Amino acid sequence: MDYIKLLRPAQWSKNLFVFLPLFFAHDIDNLPRLLAVIVAFFALSMASSCIYVLNDMCDVEFDRKHPEKCRRPIASGRVSLPVARGIYIFLLLLSVVIVALFIPTTSMFVVLATYLLINHAYSLWLKHIAILDVMLVAFGFVLRIIAGAVAAEVVPSHWIIIMTFLLALFLVLAKRRDDVIKYERTQAVARRNVTAYNRNYLDHVITLVAAITLVSYIMYTVDEEIVARFDCSYVYATSIFVLAGILRYLQITLVEEKSWSPTQIIMRDRFLQLSVAGWLLLFAYIIYG
């Protein structure tokens, strides 16, 4: 169980972003392309687990002093550092082998290498630099979109790149706010750069990014090229679900102050689940109906 926990499989849900380019390309029912995207999903999942293991190894001494992170497999001593290093190397090689066997293209190798290099740099150093840390995490989601597009051999629109980055940035900033709140209450340092942020700054930035995200999405839905591509004049109707989702997440962040894990929040919050489901179903009807 500790070895599985070390891999953080619940976080693999972030890699579902790889399916979006194929979905919006009106080609999700193309079996060969869909299988290629599924392979990309597993390759990125192994790569992301590899990074989580590396991160826990780098932060082991720091985590042991933290009231919550001290229970992590490596920090608690339930998984030794030598074993963790072996798992890290295995996952790293496995992600490369999966791509080499099933998507052996230069573009896919470049995307995977970029993902690994950026995340290694993030774990070892860049995560300690405020502002850059949240932007790099958001860029990681953009790389997931690009990986899905490369695997499916489709060209992602500039809109999907912009919206993915903005949405991811919004979620990461909300998580940083939770780190700041915990620091204010308990003096527990969730990450070394937590003192570079404060609640007032993050409240303003989160609200700003939320507004930009919503406005950008509405602009996307009324773009003439998008309307023509989907042959639908009411793409803007999907905005209601995006607005509902953003308002609910702001409520969780600013009112309930529980924005500690975007993945677990979405998995537990029924309102957010209904918002995402409504958005997906309406878009599926627009594209495939």
Image: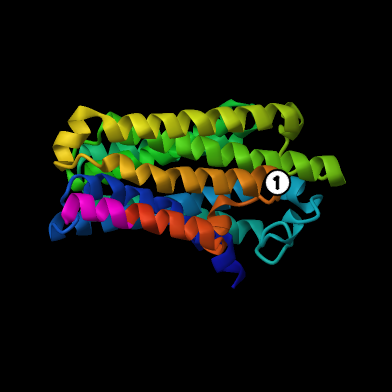
251 with respect to 9 (left or right): right
Position of 287 relative to 177 (above/below)? below
Q: Residue at the right extreme? A: 186
Residue that badge 1 annotates: 255
Residue type indicated by callout 1: Val
Q: Label 1, secondary structure: give it.
A: helix
For the point 40% across and 38% down, the residue is 164
- Side of 145 relative to 170 (left or right): left
Q: Is residue 9 visible?
A: yes
Answer whether residue 282 is magenta in the image.
Answer: yes
As for residue 75 lying within the magenta part, the answer is no
Q: Quadrant of the N terminus?
A: bottom right
Dominant secondary structure, magenta = helix
The residue positioned 60% from the left and 36% from the top of the image is 173
The quarter of the picture where the C terminus appears is bottom left
Magenta range is 281-289
Find residue 152 and report its horizontal and vertical position in percent.
20, 47
